Image: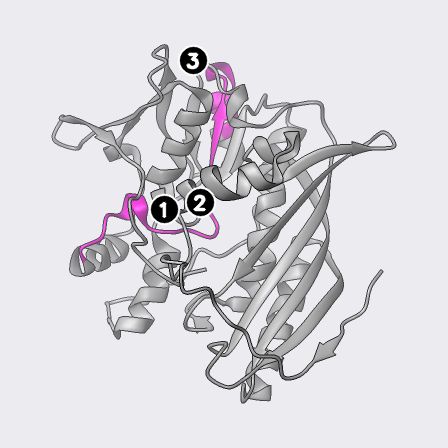
Amino acid sequence: MGEFTLSCPVPITQSPTILMAHGSGGTMMHRLLETMFLPAFQNDELLAQHDGASFNINGARLAFTTDSFVVRPLFFPGGDIGSLAVNGTVNDLAMCGARPLYLSAGFILEEGLPMDSLERVVASMRAAAETAGVHIVTGDTKVVDKGKGDGLYINTSGIGVVEHDLTIAPQSVRPGDSVILSGDIGRHGMAVMAVREGLEFESQIESDCAPLASPVLALLDAGIAVRCLRDLTRGGLATTLVEIARSARLHIHIHEDAIPVLEDVRGACEILGLDPMYVANEGRFIAFVPPEDRDRALDILGASAAHIGDVTEANDSLVTLKSTIGATRIVDMLSGEQLPRIC
């Protein structure tokens, strides 16, 4: 369906007016979206502001998404930029309730990148695609001058098919819905940061990087009336919940003692002064389901899943958290880039 092309070398320039150097996940990116990108490209699919766009073509309902990956370092415990690129795009399709099918892959290579590093990444992408059941069918390769590309960047886009009639989106969330978290949080961000900072723990923290289509499709195949799905990438659990509360114009109340965090991850966060609620994940998602479907959904997702809160009747677009000591506080969106270059 496509072929790879090679251009070499091409310098890249950056606008001096871009103030945010690394990634997104906070209020800065949301301001960019609201003031620049959405007004410029406005259409119904884009305004849904979901993890991907859903549309109908000749009776088939499809989902389409794209993402870019600039993680540093390229290799980290539990994964690398290659597996991250495949799983990240597969997961965005899964959050639309789609069965992922095909991916594209665009490589921006820095002059001087060791060939064995590229071979490791390509092999990792192949293995990740096989595990996720998708095919990489088209792509592109560019080379930039030494010192201009930090080794390797990857862009992936994906297409999947939606095989149900549900509208899985924040606007489908209803008062009384249960919030289910698929597993412990914070591992990906801390795995990357531990390598960068040279932190050592009793056991190595490994990224949770994994494809999420299988558990999502299991929920749908079981007839769970899934309202909304979102993977917990940049900005973590907290920012994701705030985004959904604002889009749904409802109140989400969660319980801190219900949120699983591994002790090594908690310890790493304390050393670095970070809150696990805001740390990125690459293999975790939240699902909003009707209360009558909650227990079945938890059974399907397994022992690692947890019911962490519920949607209330209030329409104040807030997220509140009951702490382990019983106090209640408002959970806000990540205001800055807490962990740059983690995906």
User: Callout 1, which amino acid?
Assistant: Met
Label 1 crowd bin: few (<14), some (14–19), many (20+), radius 10 Å? some
Q: Give how far across and how far down residue 288 sits, in percent.
A: 48, 26
Label 2 crowd bin: few (<14), some (14–19), many (20+), radius 10 Å? few
- Please name the residue that numbered disc 2 is placed on: 32
Q: Residue 220's image quarter?
A: top right
Q: Is residue 103 above or below residue 152?
A: above
Q: Nearer the viewer, mark 3 or mark 1?
A: 1
Query: Residue at the spot x=33%, y=72% of the render?
Result: 195
Indicate the secondary structure of the residue bearing disc 3: loop
User: Callout 2, which amino acid?
Assistant: Leu
Query: Residue at the spot x=57%, y=61% of the render?
Result: 85
Q: Which residues are magenta?
A: 273-297
Indicate the secondary structure of the residue bearing disc 1: helix
Q: Is residue 42 above or below residue 264?
A: above
Viewer-side residue, 141 vs 167: 141
Query: Residue at the spot x=56%, y=79% of the render?
Result: 11
